C-alpha cells in the first residue's frame, strides 16, 4: 500500500547508543489502499472495491446479513523494535443508500487485530482471516447519526502489530452485538473524496532498534506509576545488565549499570509526568526496549 507519509526524523548518538527521536507518520492511502467488506448473506462474494466501511447487521429479504469491514495500513516504514508512543485511527461518515444512509441502532463497535493474511480482491465471509481479542478497542454507540469517528486510540494494537509483524494484517471492525437493525456508515480508501479516506496517525520512537539482538521477557509493575515501579526480567545466570531511561526526544535521563539480579527499582525522583523510553541490555545485545509512563 502506498501512503501519504509525513516524517520528522532526528538522529542523535548518546553513549554509543543510536537513539532516533520521535517520528510522526501519517497514513491515508487512496484507491491503492487495502480494505474490503465481507457479508454473511453472500459468503462467497468479494467486496474489495467497496467505497464504504460499513459494519452492520440488517435483515434483507427476511434474512440476516452481517457485514464486517477489514483494513490494513502499510507499516513497513516503522523499524522492528520501535516503541509506539501513540496511534490514532480516524474514519469519516458519508451518506450511502443501503441498507441505511445514517448510523443507527445498537451500533457499538469493536476493532480487533487480524492475525492471518488476507487478499483484498479475494477475501470473502467464507475465507475471512482470523483475529485476536488481545488489546481490542471498543467504541460506544454513536451519539450522532452522521458523526465521524476521529482519533480512535489504537496504540496498544499498533504496538502488537510492530512486535508481532508476521502475525499482524490490519484491523477488523464489527458491531459489538451483531443483531439487527444496526449500522455504521463510513468511507473506505476507494471513496472518490480523498478527504474521507481512513487515516492512521502514528507517533513512534525507533529507540535502540539496532542494539537489541535478542529480546527477553520484561514486566513492569505498576506502569503507569507515581513514585516508583519494579522492573523484572529474565536473568537466570546473573549476567550484568545496564538499564537506561530516555525521554521521547532521545535524551538520556538515567543509567543504572551492572545489574546482576532480575529486578530493578525505578524511582520517579524529580521526573515530570509523561512518557519515557527504557532500554535494558547486556554486553551481548540481549535485552528489551519499552515504555514507562509516570502519572
Image (tube, rainbow, N blue to C red):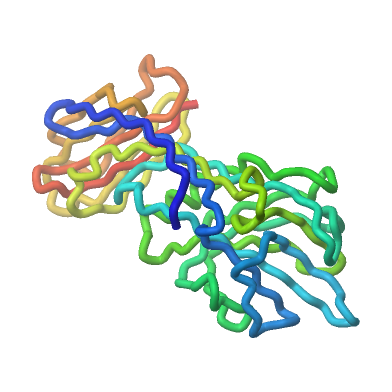
Q: Quadrant of residue 173?
A: bottom right
In the image: residue 146, left or right of residue 229: right
| Residue 26 position in % (x across, y down) | 48, 41
Residue ID at (18%, 43%): 211
Q: Is residue 164 above or below residue 123?
A: above
In the image: residue 122, left or right of residue 285: right
Q: Residue furthest right?
A: 62
In the image: residue 238, left or right of residue 291: left
Q: Nearer the viewer, residue 122 or 225?
A: 122
**Do we see residue 222 in this rendering?**
no
Q: Is residue 180 above or below residue 107?
A: below
Q: Nearer the viewer, residue 109 or 196?
A: 196
Q: Residue furthest left?
A: 283
| Residue 236 position in % (x across, y down) | 18, 54
| Residue 48 position in % (x across, y down) | 59, 70
Which image quadrant: the N terminus? bottom left
**Do we see residue 260 in this rendering?**
yes
Q: Is residue 43 above or below residue 216?
A: below
Q: Quadrant of residue 18?
A: top left
Amino acid at each position: 500500500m502506498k501512503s501519504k507519509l509525513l516524517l520528522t526524523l532526528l538522529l542523535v548518538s548518546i553513549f554509543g547508543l543510536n537513539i532516533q527521536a520521535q517520528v510522526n507518520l501519517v497514513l491515508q492511502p487512496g484507491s491503492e489502499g487495502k480494505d474490503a467488506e465481507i457479508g454473511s448473506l453472500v459468503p462467497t462474494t468479494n467486496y474489495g472495491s467497496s467505497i464504504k466501511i460499513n459494519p452492520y447487521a440488517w435483515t434483507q429479504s427476511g434474512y440476516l446479513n452481517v457485514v464486517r469491514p477489514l483494513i490494513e495500513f502499510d507499516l513497513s516504514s516503522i523499524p522492528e523494535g520501535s516503541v509506539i508512543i501513540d496511534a490514532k485511527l480516524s474514519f469519516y461518515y458519508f451518506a450511502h443508500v443501503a441498507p441505511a444512509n445514517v448510523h443507527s441502532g445498537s451500533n457499538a463497535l469493536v476493532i480487533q487485530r487480524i492475525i492471518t493474511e488476507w487478499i483484498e480482491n479475494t477475501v470473502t465471509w467464507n475465507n475471512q482471516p482470523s483475529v485476536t481479542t488481545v488489546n481490542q478497542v471498543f467504541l460506544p454507540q454513536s451519539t450522532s447519526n452522521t458523526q465521524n469517528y476521529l482519533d480512535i486510540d489504537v496504540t496498544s494494537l499498533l504496538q502488537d502489530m510492530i512486535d508481532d509483524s508476521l502475525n499482524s494484517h490490519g484491523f477488523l471492525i464489527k458491531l459489538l452485538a451483531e443483531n439487527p437493525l444496526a449500522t455504521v456508515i463510513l468511507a473506505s480508501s476507494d471513496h472518490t473524496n480523498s478527504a474521507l479516506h481512513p487515516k492512521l496517525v502514528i507517533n513512534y520512537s525507533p529507540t535502540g532498534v539496532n542494539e537489541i539482538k535478542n529480546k527477553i521477557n520484561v514486566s513492569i509493575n505498576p506502569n503507569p506509576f507515581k513514585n516508583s515501579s519494579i522492573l523484572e526480567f529474565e536473568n537466570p545466570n546473573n549476567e550484568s545488565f545496564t538499564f537506561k531511561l530516555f525521554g521521547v526526544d532521545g535524551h538520556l535521563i538515567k543509567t543504572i549499570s551492572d545489574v546482576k539480579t532480575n529486578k530493578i527499582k525505578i524511582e520517579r525522583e524529580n521526573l515530570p509526568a509523561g512518557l519515557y523510553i527504557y532500554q535494558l541490555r547486556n554486553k551481548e545485545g540481549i535485552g528489551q526496549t519499552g515504555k514507562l509512563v509516570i502519572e
